[in-house]
Image: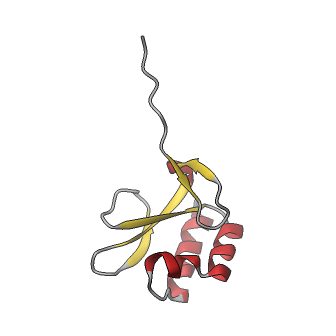
Amino acid sequence: MKVIKKKPLRTCMACNEQKEKKELLRIVKSKEGIIEPDLTGKKNGRGAYICKNEECLNKLIKSKRLERIFEKEISSELYESIRGVIIDK
């Protein structure tokens, strides 16, 4: 009997859709309080996920949901670096 491995599902913070982990971009906050995109998906810290499209990023910026999740103000530079990762995919 072959065991089928479940694929990990995560929820996008902007559109609340559940997708496979590899389809989403992980944003991580380290213990030192540094927030950055996690391209490997394996960095230590509190993670949050977003779809790899500009529409979800714009929703996230408008709602300030990322700021509430990480309890920290997010700079426009960080949002632009996330946008760069999404566009380069």
In the image, taking residue 80 as reference, residue 40 lies left or right, namely: left
The x and y percentages for residue 43 are: 33, 62
Quarter of image, res 72? bottom left
In this view, which residue lies farthest toward the left? 32
Which residue lies at the image location 43% right of the left edge and 15% below the top edge?
A: 2
In the image, taking residue 62 as reference, residue 47 lies left or right, namely: left
With respect to residue 18, does 76 lie above or below?
below
The x and y percentages for residue 21 are: 50, 50
With respect to residue 36, does 88 lie above or below?
above
In this view, which residue lies farthest toward the top? 1
Which residue lies at the image location 66% right of the left edge and 63% below the top edge?
A: 53
With respect to residue 17, does 77 lie above or below?
below
Quadrant placement of the C terminus: bottom right
Figure colour scheme:
secondary structure
In the image, taking residue 44 as reference, residue 57 lies left or right, namely: right
The x and y percentages for residue 7 are: 49, 38
Quarter of image, res 59? bottom right
The x and y percentages for residue 37 are: 45, 69
Which residue lies at the image location 49% right of the left edge and 75% below the top edge?
A: 69
**Count of marks placed on residues:** 0
Quarter of image, res 86? bottom right
Give 68 or 39, whichever is nearer the viewer: 68
Quadrant placement of the N terminus: top left
Which residue lies at the image location 61% right of the left edge and 51% below the top edge?
A: 18
